[in-house]
């Protein structure tokens, strides 16, 4: 019988192509700090697909989602930043930025796609843990004052 870790690894591997697709979509459609409207909507659609409750408009375009375990316990927060930088992409890849002068040069596209993957894995295992997981999709990490302080102000 496979261990829980082996099952988790296998489930994560089955998600790989979907996560790569999400990351490439995000990479092609970068948005600057405080302008992450479409990125936020993309995250919301994925959370809806996973039946994960969320609150939008947190600290601007931030999204706060919640996965409840089977009973009381600790609350753990996982965070991903969503904004891009005002840099012209020079990479010659099929999924290069389609937005002139804007690209994901710091990996925020990967962070967002990875947190969506973690959300899927955690949602499917909500019966296996106690406590809560809060998922914070943060806007405007690259600017000060940034999205983190605004999300906190809005109750994240």
Image: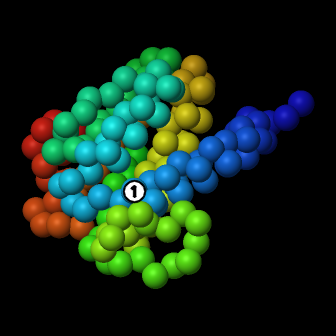
Q: Nearer the viewer, residue 76 or 44?
A: 44
- Please state the total of marks drawn on the protein image: 1
Q: Nearer the viewer, residue 148 or 43?
A: 43
At which x and y percent is residue 140?
Answer: 22, 58
For disc 1, the neighbor class at 10 Å (few under 14, some 14 to 19, many from 20) is many
Q: Between residues 2 and 142, which one lies in front from this camera angle?
A: 142
Its colouring scheme is rainbow
Asked if residue 142 can be seen in this view, the reply is: yes
Q: Residue at x 67, y 42 (%)?
A: 15
Q: Position of residue 116 (x, y in %)?
A: 49, 42
Q: Nearer the viewer, residue 63 or 72?
A: 63
Q: Which residue is mark 1?
A: 29
Percent coordinates x, y for residue 79 in the rendering: 37, 50
| Relative vertical location of residue 93 with respect to residue 27 in this rendering, above or below | below
Res 14 quadrant in image: top right
Residue at 59% x, 26% y is 124
Callout 1: SS: loop
The quarter holding residue 153 reads: top left
**Residue positioned 51% across, 79% down in the render:** 91
Residue 5 visible in the snapshot: no
Q: Is residue 12 left or right of residue 72?
A: right
Determine whether, in the image, residue 156 is placed left or right of residue 115: left
Instruction: Name the quadrant of the C terminus.
Output: top left
Which residue is found at the position 45% from the left and 60% from the top? Answer: 28
Q: Residue furthest right?
A: 1
Height in image: 132 above or below 150?
A: above
Q: Tell me where residue 77 appears, x and y as whole percent.
A: 37, 43
- For the N terminus, the quadrant is top right
């Amino acid at each position: 019988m496979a261990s829980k870790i082996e099952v988790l690894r296998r489930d994560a591997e089955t998600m790989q192509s979907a996560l790569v697709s999400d990351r490439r979509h995000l990479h092609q459609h970068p948005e600057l700090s405080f302008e992450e409207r479409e990125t936020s909507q993309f995250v919301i659609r994925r959370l809806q697909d996973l039946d994960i409750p969320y609150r939008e408009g947190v600290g601007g375009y931030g999204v706060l989602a919640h996965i409840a375990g089977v009973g009381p316990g600790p609350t753990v927060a996982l965070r991903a930043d969503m904004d891009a930088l005002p840099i012209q992409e020079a990479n010659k890849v099929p999924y290069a930025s389609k937005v002139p002068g804007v690209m994901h040069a710091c990996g925020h596209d990967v962070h967002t796609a990875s947190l969506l993957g973690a959300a899927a894995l955690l949602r499917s295992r909500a019966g296996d843990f106690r406590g809560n997981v809060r998922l914070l999709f943060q806007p405007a990490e690259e600017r000060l004052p940034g999205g983190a302080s605004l999300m906190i102000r809005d109750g994240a």
